[in-house]
Image (spheres, rainbow, N blue to C red):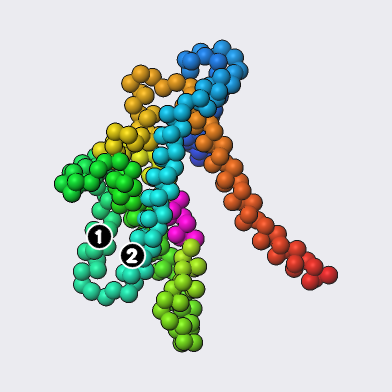
Amino acid sequence: MRARSKLPNIFLGAVTAVLYLPIILIVLYSFNASKLSSIWEGFSLKWYTALFRDQALFAALGNSLVLALAASLAAAVVGTLGAYGFTKVRTRSRKVVEYLTMLPIMIPEIILGMVFMVTFALIGLPFGMTTLILAHTTFCIPYVYMLVKARLVGMDQSIPEAARDLGASEVRVFFDITLPMLMPAILSGMLLSFAMSFDDVIISIFVTGVNVNTLPIRIYTQLKTGVTPEINALCTLMLAVTLLLGGAAWALRRVPRMGKRTGIRGLSR
């Protein structure tokens, strides 16, 4: 029985090692003086120096950030309005439209990329940042839609109904009551959309232009000649920024709770 009780811990440790060991190796080898990851020649910061001198890589990073931010914002608007609008619709075609809304998630990316490429070519839209934003927004909308729809289903409808009974218009109820209650789901959908857009390669290759290069595409094209440790340094910096933002969000969430506890203690005294 004791041997069996250790199996879940062993399995959990193995899964954790598989998930996080590559990340740890990337961080370690970003400080390696050697260009080869298989050889450790000592601690060095030269790859970080080379990274900050690579203007093309930073330009691709800037394009990816702008693209992901624009796509997530547009998806948040369209997905939120779509989810809210479907709660007001009572037609037979509602289920069909909802199914069509989820198609960008179910269709393979290579097919979706080819569809976007043919569509943009037929309407004569120049390939570049505009086509990238349109394509990324399309496959990001379902993520926001699903989260907002789930939030609407679990939301207490008595609150907006009470506001209507007190004379509030439908628009004011949406902006003053419904939208603040949906904000956690909207932000979660935006973060998920940002991540999906930021690391997309397949669809971006089909719809990007000659003068627009994103970070995933640049890294993918460098695989032919070999990825330099500059990429390890960039990944380490991005990981550090992500951890800092996550820690800041966690700290901000704890501040109101600590304030409430302090207030309760003060009242008890």
Q: Main secondary structure of the magenta part?
A: helix
> Which numbered circle lies on residue 233?
none
- Looking at the image, which is closer to me, 232 or 3? 232
Is 35 rendered above or below residue 253?
A: above
Label 1: how many Cα within 10 Å (few below 14, some 14–19, many 20+): few
- Looking at the image, which is closer to me, 84 or 154? 84
> SS class of the residue under badge 2?
helix
Q: Residue at x 39, y 45 (%)?
A: 67
Q: Residue furthest left?
A: 122
- Give the number of marks: 2
Is 152 rendered above or below residue 101?
A: below
Q: Residue at x 37, y 30 (%)?
A: 218
What is the three-letter code of the residue carrying label 2?
Gly
> Does residue 13 appear in the picture of this structure?
no
Residue 206 percent across, percent down from the top left: 25, 38
Label 1 sits on residue: 99
Q: Residue at x 33, y 55 (%)?
A: 142
Q: Residue at x 49, y 78 (%)?
A: 159
Which range of residues does the magenta coloring cover?
184-191
Q: Is residue 30 magenta?
A: no
Residue 54 percent across, percent down from the top left: 47, 26
Label 2 sits on residue: 82
Is 149 rendered above or below residue 209?
A: below
Whichever of labels 2 and 1 marks the residue nearer the N terminus, that label is 2
Q: Residue furthest right?
A: 269
Quarter of the rendering containing residue 174? bottom left
> Does residue 160 appear in the picture of this structure?
yes
What is the three-letter code of the residue carrying label 1?
Tyr
Callout 2–callout 1 Cβ contact below 8 Å: no
